[in-house]
Amino acid sequence: MTSFGYISQGFRVVTKGFLLRMCPLLGAALFLSSQVLDAGNVPATQWFPLQKDNVWVLQLTNSDTRTISCLQASRSRSLVRGLFQEDVQLRGNSSGTLLGLGSTRHWQTLFRFNRRNGLKWGFNLTGESCSAEQANWITNKEIVVTPAGTFAGCRHLELAALTVTNSACAAADPSELWFAPNVGPVALKSANGDLYLLSSAKIGKQSLPPATNGVVATLTPDRDSYVNVASGIFCPPCVTSSPPCEIACRIGDAVTATAHFTFEVINQSPDPVTFTFPTSQQFDIDLIDQSGAIVKAWSDGQAFADIVTTLTMQPGQTNTFSGDILLADRQGHQLGGVYAAWAFLTDSSGPTVQATTSITVMLVESLDL
């Protein structure tokens, strides 16, 4: 079963409904390091693109959807519907701030993309007491897995009603938002805690998820989580002083886990499909950290014959590729944290067939802990 809704926050996973297990995406795209931005040095519209006719469709597990759309756009502002309860005009500046104009008819700071995590600011789009909200960034390096793709380097915003203690006022909606660089909102949590994930989008000339031309893929790890054990000297704690504690310390060697991935490619089109590869290598698997950087690849250290190869898949045919990755980075340091795994065919036309999943790697001092 294909599952979505994985959002990394350190070692915590935000899920909803059946999204309790980190499973592979079907035909998903990965948006990685080339799109990861420094929040303080880029225009706000790179975090929230505001071209006319941009549309983001976010879906709940029961098929309920919320749509955010840019209805009009001038040189300096855009009319956005579906983000808040009322339409709002948005405009960005080069310092990373997105301003909003609601029924109060004066511009307010809505999203401070240049703000450090934990520093709060407030706004009120309607001027009514129940509309006063407080915002702050929780993290700025998260991986979000959605039906439309896997996004690295996301910023996570928390919104709260300033008058929530007043029983006549509803909680803030949305209560949380996730923004991916050059994409915009990829996840949204409603006031009652429902998690909506990006299912499709049109951003300028880009459409998500990308067309698959009838060839789809899945990527499955042998486990959802792995344990790396660091080397060091380990001294068990003393539990008694009578007789005196004489438990010996020991030297522990590092133990680095290996992840086994299965990359399955299926031709669901009615016609044969041929892929051409510039070398004998036909696929690869990259591990990407939460900032969007590639830390390890299956092909690292391998040699491939410098000959052109081809792969022809008949309608309904399945090809399975597999690869093992030692969970240490390219400098040999053991991995620890949440990582996206991206598998793709290395055909000459680029990674048109790809799939992603996510894994967690726990870095511990001793298995005895």
Image: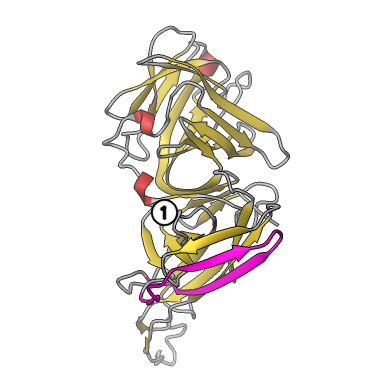
Q: Provide the residue designation for mark 1.
A: 290
Residue 347: in sight, yes or no?
A: yes
Q: Residue at x 69, y 42 (%)?
A: 61
Q: Point out residue 279 in the picture as x, y percentages from the top left corner.
A: 42, 69
Hey, which quadrant is residue 167 in on the image?
top right
Q: Is residue 283 above or below residue 26?
A: below
Disc 1 marks a residue whose amino acid type is Gln
Q: Is residue 179 left or right of residue 265?
A: left
Q: Is residue 23 visible?
A: no
Q: Nearer the viewer, residue 324 or 239?
A: 324
Q: Is residue 170 magenta?
A: no
Mark 1 closeness class: few <14, some 14–19, many ≥20 residues within 10 Å: many
The quarter holding residue 327 reads bottom left
Which residue is painted at 54% across and 55% down in the image?
A: 353
**Residue 318 horizontal/vertical position (percent):** 66, 65
Range of magenta residues: 301-328
310, above or below 269, in the image: below
Tell me: residue 108, above or below residue 330: above
